[in-house]
Image (cartoon, helix red, strand yellow):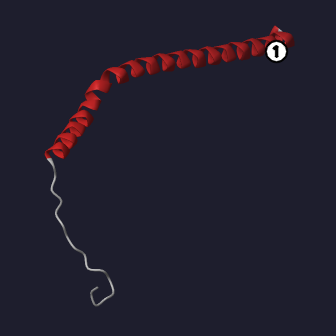
Amino acid sequence: MSENNTPAVVEQKKKVSPASWVAVASAFAVTAAMPVASNAALAEIGADLTAELDAGKLIIVAVMTLGATLLAMFAGYRYMKRGANSA
């Protein structure tokens, strides 16, 4: 132990075997190739998501149109109920 009561650090260099180099290199290659391989799957998911968003927009526009039509019918009914000469 050194004077400040901490254990002395012994530095040792570990030798890396060729098998470790091959394993690291292959892991790096597989990781680098993943985005290229997954682009096809992402394109398919993107197309599905676009279709779902288009369907959602269609539903929202249909509901808003229905609401505007019902509001116009209600306003027209009240107007006709009061009589055409009251305007």
Check the image and name the residue furthest to the bottom.
3
Q: Residue 61, percent across and down?
A: 58, 17
Question: Vertical placement of 56 versus 14: above or below?
Answer: above
Q: Is residue 20 left or right of residue 51?
A: left
Q: Is residue 20 left or right of residue 7?
A: left
Check the image and name the residue furthest to the right.
82
The residue that appears at 26% across and 79% down in the rendered structure is 8
Q: What element carries label 1?
A: helix
Q: Is residue 27 left or right of residue 43?
A: left
The residue that appears at 50% across and 18% down in the rendered structure is 52
Question: Vertical placement of 2 versus 64: above or below?
Answer: below
The residue that appears at 53% across and 15% down in the rendered structure is 55
Image-quadrant location for residue 29? top left
Image-quadrant location for residue 80? top right
Tally of numbered tags: 1
Q: For mark 1, does the 10 Å Cα neighbourhood hold few (<14), some (14 to 19), or many (20 or more) residues? A: few
Residue in front for this viewpoint, 32 or 8: 8
Image-quadrant location for residue 24? top left
Residue in front for this viewpoint, 41 or 78: 41
Residue in front for this viewpoint, 39 or 29: 29
The disc labelled 1 sits on which kind of residue? Arg
Q: For the N terminus, which image quadrant? A: bottom left
Q: Residue 9, percent across and down?
A: 25, 75
Q: Residue 53, percent across and down?
A: 50, 21
Q: Name the residue under label 1.
A: 78
Residue in front for this viewpoint, 68 or 78: 68
Q: For the C terminus, which image quadrant? A: top right
Q: Is residue 76 left or right of residue 11?
A: right
